[in-house]
């Protein structure tokens, strides 16, 4: 629900720390705050303050002082939301924050909904829709690369690219439709060869953007990495080593891990979600078998599988585990790394023997490690980075991380492919114009030039309150 006429309020800072910020935005921001805020200089009137000014004083209710605060004044349109806005910096006591919010609401404000401040910023032209979505991504960023991508998108790098593509297509759409207005006179305003060049250029850029989604999704949401293998091969020890924490129970008793254990770690700016699973073996234990079933489910969802094998138990293919994983690999882009574990420094001569016997297939690699001593772990981290697409995210890199953008760009590509097919087959101009207009429509959905209340609701409901 869009409530542009209301004045909204909410906490704008997270938990922890000594200072909290309460944000107020809307036409009555200064008037409402003026009823509960009393400047230390009695000559100052809050409603007369210029934008970008800060006033010191007290929040009071009757004769009771709630807190000493700083009030920052932002005048429309020079505020985050483009509206009259106030930010109250108070002490971070939950009681103080709650009391300030109660006073604001009692004097005419309403509690903000999730994402309502950013939604107002979008509606007031302070940012487009993709930039607004980047705000949520920036808050949720768990790695350096996720932060960099969100910053680039929030600065408008992606928006600018979409705007240029849309403008090119709009120019030719208008020319084609002008031809339709003069259909009986057989005139041609849109050069078909030039139209083809423009469509090919837009199509190429669109496909480049969609192809970046796998990398972007991995950076944003984390790369799922499953650690699997037979019981007692060192899977839990490896997880603990990677996480630098005793996350999993390590025991010589087979079948200790009955369910999967999951945690995250950032390596070279990329978030990985490591999942330690139940050891693969035949068992009469119902609970353990449920864990093994879940192991195979997690393997099917993973981007990378680490098959841990004990060097003392012979080469992995002998126990059938590798063959089972290979069957699951069919038709997937999942990468498999065979980790030969419990390698001592004086046993590195086994490397050539294992590599020679392995007959590795596509998407498979073999490494030699010791999860106990940490030997070979740096090499494993480098290999994970290579597989995950550890490309350098440059200052102006445009990488798609949002499934909504990805879906829209796929539809743009489909529409433009139909335009090219129509030009090749000399179909009527009105049908070509429809496909060009569809491509323009989907590009407009990304930036928010074309949108609905339903789309806005779906986007902003996932924001945190106060943003």
Image (cartoon, rainbow, N blue to C red):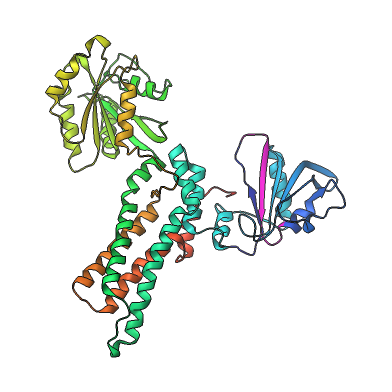
Q: Is residue 365 found inside the magenta-colored segment of the image?
A: no
Residue 333, x across and y down, in percent? 23, 41
The span picked out in magenta is: 16-29
- The image quarter containing residue 200 is bottom left
Report the side of 31 relative to 206 (left or right): right
Residue 302, x across and y down, in percent? 29, 37
Which residue is more in the foreground, 40 or 106?
A: 40
Q: Is residue 23 found inside the magenta-colored segment of the image?
A: yes
From this viewpoint, is residue 26 visible? yes
- The image quarter containing residue 165 is bottom left
Identify the residue at image location x=59%, y=54%: 117
Identify the residue at image location x=44%, y=66%: 450
Identify the residue at image location x=23%, y=22%: 230
Residue 234, x across and y down, in percent? 30, 19
Report the side of 92 relative to 338 (left or right): right
Figure quadrant of the N terminus:
bottom right
Report the residue that reaches farthest toward the right: 43
From this viewpoint, is residue 107 visible? no
Report the side of 92 relative to 182 (left or right): right
């Amino acid at each position: 629900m869009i409530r542009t006429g209301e004045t909204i309020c909410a906490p704008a800072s997270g938990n922890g720390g000594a200072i909290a910020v309460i944000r107020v935005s809307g036409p009555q921001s200064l008037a409402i705050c003026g009823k509960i805020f009393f400047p230390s200089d009695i000559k100052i009137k809050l409603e007369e303050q210029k934008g970008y000014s800060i006033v010191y004083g007290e929040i009071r209710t009757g004769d009771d002082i709630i807190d000493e605060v700083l009030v920052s004044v932002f005048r429309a349109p020079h505020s985050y939301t483009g509206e009259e806005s106030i930010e109250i910096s108070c002490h971070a006591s939950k009681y103080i924050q709650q009391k300030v919010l109660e006073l604001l609401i009692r004097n005419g404000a309403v509690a903000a909904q999730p994402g309502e401040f950013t939604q107002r910023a979008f509606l007031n032209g302070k940012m487009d829709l993709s930039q607004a979505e980047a705000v949520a991504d920036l808050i949720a960023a768990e790695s350096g690369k996720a932060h960099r991508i969100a910053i680039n998108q929030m600065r408008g790098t992606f928006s600018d690219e979409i705007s240029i593509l849309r403008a090119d297509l709009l120019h030719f759409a208008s020319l084609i439709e002008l031809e339709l207005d003069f259909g009986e006179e057989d005139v041609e305003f849109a050069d078909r060869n030039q139209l083809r060049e423009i469509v090919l250029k837009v199509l190429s850029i669109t496909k480049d953007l969609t192809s970046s989604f796998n990398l972007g999704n991995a950076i944003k949401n984390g790369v799922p990495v499953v650690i699997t293998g037979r019981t007692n091969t060192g899977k839990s020890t490896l997880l603990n080593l990677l996480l630098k924490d005793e996350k999993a129970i390590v025991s010589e008793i087979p079948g200790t891990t009955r369910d999967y254990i999951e945690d995250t770690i950032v390596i070279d700016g990329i978030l990985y979600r490591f999942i330690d699973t139940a050891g693969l073996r035949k068992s009469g234990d119902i609970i353990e078998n449920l864990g093994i079933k879940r192991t195979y489910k997690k393997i099917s969802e993973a981007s990378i599988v680490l098959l841990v094998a004990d060097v003392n138990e012979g080469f992995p293919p002998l126990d059938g585990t590798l063959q089972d994983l290979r069957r699951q690999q069919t038709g997937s882009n999942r990468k498999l790394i065979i980790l030969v574990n419990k390698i001592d420094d004086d046993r590195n001569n086994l490397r050539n023997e294992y590599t020679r016997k392995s007959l590795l297939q596509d998407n498979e690699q073999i490494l030699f490690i010791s999860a106990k001593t940490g030997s070979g772990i740096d090499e494993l981290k480098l290999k994970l980075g290579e597989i995950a697409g550890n490309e350098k995210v440059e200052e102006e890199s445009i990488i798609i991380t949002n499934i909504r953008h990805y879906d829209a760009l796929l539809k743009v590509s489909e529409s433009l492919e139909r335009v090219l097919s129509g030009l090749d087959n000399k179909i009527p101009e009105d049908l070509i114009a429809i496909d060009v207009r569809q491509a323009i429509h989907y590009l407009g959905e990304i930036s928010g030039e074309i949108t609905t209340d339903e789309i806005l609701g779906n986007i902003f409901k996932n924001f945190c309150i106060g943003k």
